Amino acid sequence: MAIPGGVFTYEELLGILARLEIPPGFKSELLHGEIVLSPQGDEEHSDIILAAREAARAAGLPRWRSLSNVLTPFPERLNGFCPDVSLLRRSAQRGARPRPAADLAGVVEVVSGDRGATDYGVKVEEYAQAGIDAYLIADPLRGTCKLCTSPVDGIYTAVDDLAFGDVIRFVADETEFVLDTSDWPRIS
């Protein structure tokens, strides 16, 4: 069933998204004012998310400052994303729902299925506009990563293409993160 645009306000859509009962194995996000359900990744997807969260712990972040799949609104373009991994700033308050974009210092998204277009497109723009220090796209389909850093005027000024097997280093909210991707799985 499709609901014509303009039926709900952005705030109502966020409320629906927050209360939506998601079928197991799926993730919901708001993309240009439409609620989108997409399949969660498989073992490879989960393994990379766990590695990113372990890197956050190794960098000294308390467990609550490294989150998975927590709704973050981006109201200007009617988006609301649930990043695979959100690395929170020191100034973030514990338990905020939805999580304000200003709380995010870094984001890791793992490409799954046809979601790559959103990860490499809309999310790059939104995360840079929000001033998120670092955005890492891990793509187990290609065995590559794209690291976007140094947002200036809503654009990431540094973009590095890396391969699984590389050691990735970036700084977010004055914290250095190191991810050894040598054992990151690929999807063939």
Image: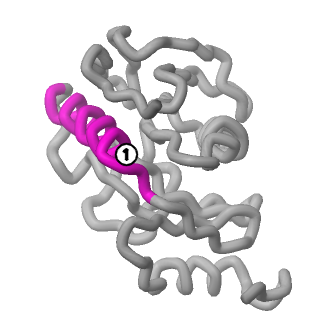
The correct choice, above or below, for 151 with respect to 96 in the image is: above
Residue with the mark numbered 1: 85
Local packing at callout 1 (Cα closer than 10 Å; few below 14, some 14-19, many 20+) is: many
Q: Secondary structure at mark 1?
A: strand
Q: Residue 153 in the image: x percent, y percent?
A: 73, 30
Image check: 145 left or right of 171? Answer: right
Would you identify the image quadrant in which residue 127 lies? top right
Residue at screen point 15% across, 44% down: 62
Q: Point out residue 83 in the picture as x, y percentages from the top left corner.
A: 46, 51
Way the structure is coloured: one colour
Tell me, yes or no, if residue 178 can be seen here: no
Taking the magenta stretch, the answer to whether it contains residue 42 is yes
Residue interval drawn in magenta: 40-58
The relative height of residue 128 versus residue 5 in the rendered view (above or below) is above
* Image coordinates for residue 16, horizontal then vertical, percent: 55, 85
Q: Residue at position x 40%, y 62% from top? A: 70
Q: Is residue 98 left or right of residue 11?
A: left
- Residue 51: x %, y % from top left: 25, 33
User: Identity of the amino acid at label 1?
Assistant: Val
